[in-house]
Image: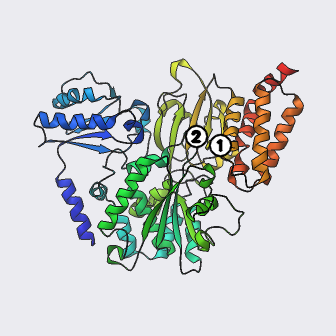
Amino acid sequence: MELTELVAIAQQESSQAKPVQIRCCMAAGCLSGNSQAVQQELDAGVKAEDLEKDVQVCGVGCMRLCCRGPLVQVDTPAGSKLYEKVTPGDALAIIEALDGGKTSVSQVDLSQPFFTSQKPIVLENSGKIDPERIQSYIAAEGYRSLYHVLREMTPTEVVETITRSGLRGRGGAGYPTGIKWATVAKAKSGRKFVICNADEGDPGAFMDRSVLESDPHRVLEGMAIAAYAVGASQGYIYVRAEYPIAIHRLQTAIHQAQRLGLLGSQIFESPFDFKIDIRIGAGAYVCGEETALMASIEGKRGLPHSRPPYPAESGLWGHPTLINNVETFANISPIIRKGADWFASIGTAKSKGTKVFALAGKIRNTGLIEVPMGTSLRQIVEEMGGGIPDGGTAKAVQTGGPSGGCIPASAFDTPVDYESLTNLGSMMGSGGMIVMDQTTNMVDVARFFMEFCMDESCGKCIPCRVGTVQLHGLLTKIREGKATHADLSLLEELCDMVKHTSLCGLGQSAPNPVFSTLRYFREEYLELIAQKD
């Protein structure tokens, strides 16, 4: 395929666009609310009213305000309207209001901070394009970046561009993406691999799932650019079986890209070959750890192993392997398209770009947000999230899932970036953000996450296998008012042991929710112990 063919597809798609667009969210959250039937009724209504010449109904990805779904957005020359909690019975009323008339179907204010404070880079196509049609992605400048790097850039120049952008891995630790790519590119081997880690297992997290459901080609394009940069010809997407919609849309996207010659052999008539396969995980949380993930792809039990060697040197089947998560790959195409300096101008000095968060918990506006690095927790919780419902007050925010920590309301003016969250005893993690109100018992929170880590431990190393069980038992004892001050001291001692002696990140980070709740909410532990004394 040549660039002219890509442009022709985009022009044809644009020429077929109709003046009025009715977009129905077909992401998992809205589908669970019967949005598929809503779309069918909208289609039927347009045909019944003989509006097919001017009105187009299409299914799109996540529209972000998940708590108000199913969502339907109507775009006309006069402006846009977003309808919330739409039922199939509302379809006719929405269609009848296309001429400017009023309707009883509830609408969402698009000028509220939840929408206006976002800066979509990863999510720029989410809720706008049809994720099951490659033409829709190409019309949104899809695969232009891949063409550019294959025809106009050397692999070294691509690595240098990603390095200058300041992009850090969005999977948790925030390791500089460019450095990781450079390490794999320099490795001497006749075979290399690129892996997309889509094993999103944190409680309350749904960022990667939403991206895969809404814009799968964006991830494929990012992987292909990465493969060209590091010299790989085979890629794998490791995604958990609990994401059937994401898996289906990925499979569809791969087949479509292959048919157009955008994956496979001699992509864009260049010497570059790249193939992507999907590997479906059974849902073990430990397989989010990169060495366990590679073992699973190899057909082995998903157990981590000590490092070094690191995957960049000796990874899948002993070959150099590049592993990044969904959000990291989704940033690649816009960086190539708009430039490293553009991306580096967003965010903070050490945390560049934006971050996607799954906002959940005791908050009015739950859903998906993408904000510049450095945005304060207060702006996210109180402005974008709309605050606590029913007149409640915010008590804490949990970031980073089981690996993160609980940040008290007194620290909500902290900017959201890698260093600031770490200094508070939490971490960025993959992007889960759970808000808790004044009714939340923080010992319960610590026990919940410890129970999760205990259940998900692979059992390979004793500190994690035994230590998490003992920690959960102590937390239960404290919560039941049966513990003493000696038990509290033992809890802290065991947390330190598990953190510093576990084999992989699951065990090493398992005590973090305990450490943070002891740091900021120690009085809740002491009150329960005082009941015993």
Q: Image check: 285 left or right of 68?
A: right
In which quadrant is the C terminus drawn?
top right
Which is more toward the observer, 430 or 75? 430
In which quadrant is the N terminus drawn?
bottom left
Q: Are there few (<14), some (14-19), or many (20+) residues within 10 Å of tag 1?
A: many
Give me the disc on residue 263.
none
Q: Position of residue 154 (x, y in %)?
A: 44, 77
Q: Are there few (<14), some (14-19), or many (20+) residues within 10 Å of tag 2?
A: some
The amino acid sitting under disc 2 is: Pro
Q: Which residue in the structure is indicated by mark 1? A: 402
Q: Position of residue 502 (x, y in %)?
A: 76, 53
Q: Which residue in the structure is indicated by mark 2? A: 203
**Is label 1 in contact with label 2 (beta carbons under 8 Å)?**
yes
Work out how far the residue at label 1 is from the one at label 2, CA to CA, in angstroms: 8 Å
Does label 1 or label 2 sit earlier along the sequence? 2
Residue drawn at x 78%, y 26% is 523
Is residue 355 visible from the viewing direction of this image?
A: yes
Is residue 121 visible from the viewing direction of this image?
A: no
Q: Image check: 94 left or right of 449?
A: left
Q: Position of residue 221 (x, y in %)?
A: 40, 63
The amino acid sitting under disc 1 is: Pro
Which is more toward the observer, 351 or 6? 6
Q: Position of residue 495 (x, y in %)?
A: 79, 43
Q: Image check: 8 left or right of 512?
A: left
Tag 2, which secondary structure?
Answer: loop
Q: Quadrant of residue 431?
A: top right
Q: Is residue 83 above or below residue 295?
A: above
Residue drawn at x 40%, y 35% is 32
